[in-house]
Amino acid sequence: MLKALIVDDEIASLRTLEILLGQYAKHIEIIGVAHSASEGVKAVSMYNPDIIFLDIEMPGGSGFDFLENCAHRNFDVIFITAYNNYAIKAFKYSAIDYLLKPIEIEELHGALEKVIRRRYSNIDGRNKYYALFENIREIVPRKLVVQTDERYECLDISSIVLVESRANGSQIKFADGSEVVVNNPFTELSALLEERSFAFISPSQQVNLEMVRKLTSSPECRIEFKNQLTIPVNPEYYKRISKHFEEISK
């Protein structure tokens, strides 16, 4: 049984979540509620919850204020928001779970399943919140949170050179020559990075165009990065990536 704390100033929303958890999440015990960020901080010390359902917009302090005032974040957070706004992009890049109001049962189940898997696998999730605090202050997030077998890693997007698909996840290569294999599916990472200056060079590879030094098409299509790494480019993608490279180089 996991202990849950709800921090939300809207009574109707709070009651709805209590009902949904009571009916559809028997493995979750609600051990307390709080109606503001300051009440939430006190409740954390009092109850030591495993999961916190946290509203973003509250009088007297936001959900982010609440997190920054919690000295020890040994709990998982599921954010709740009525707005599909800029914060959602920061959540996605930071691997943060969230629910949109009105809450749908399927979305609630999905968020809880991810939290439960993390807690029982003992993966260290603190890096997610460090990345969130930085990303939430940016119009375009600069950090990407990925998951390895042991923990969440907080990556500087600008240092990534290449992302490749692997059987059970993805491989990420960096400008300094290092690399890491992560559990995140390539489709998940590429969807986020495509919003930045990343482009496909094959169905299973994506590169950071800001790290590209030059492109060559003869005798074969190749891409050379600023760190001297050189790799072939799928000819079907060469024309498209050349156009993107020219645009960001102007």
Image: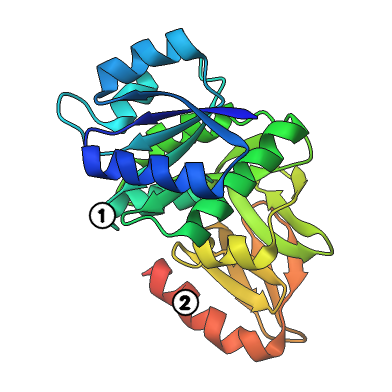
The answer to whether residue 143 is visible is no
Residue 128 rendering spot, x and y as whole percentages: 53, 35
* 131 left or right of 127 in image: left
- The answer to whether residue 236 is above or below residue 115 is below
Which residue bears the numbered disc 1? 83
Three-letter amino acid code at the position of disc 1: Tyr
Which residue bears the numbered disc 2? 244
Comparing 1 with 119, the one in front is: 1
* 222 left or right of 158 in image: right
Label 1's element?
loop
Q: Residue at x 64, y 37 (%)?
A: 153
Q: Quadrant of residue 133?
A: top left
Label 2's element?
helix
| Tag of residue 217 | none
Residue 236 rendering spot, x and y as whole percentages: 66, 91
Q: How many marks overall?
A: 2
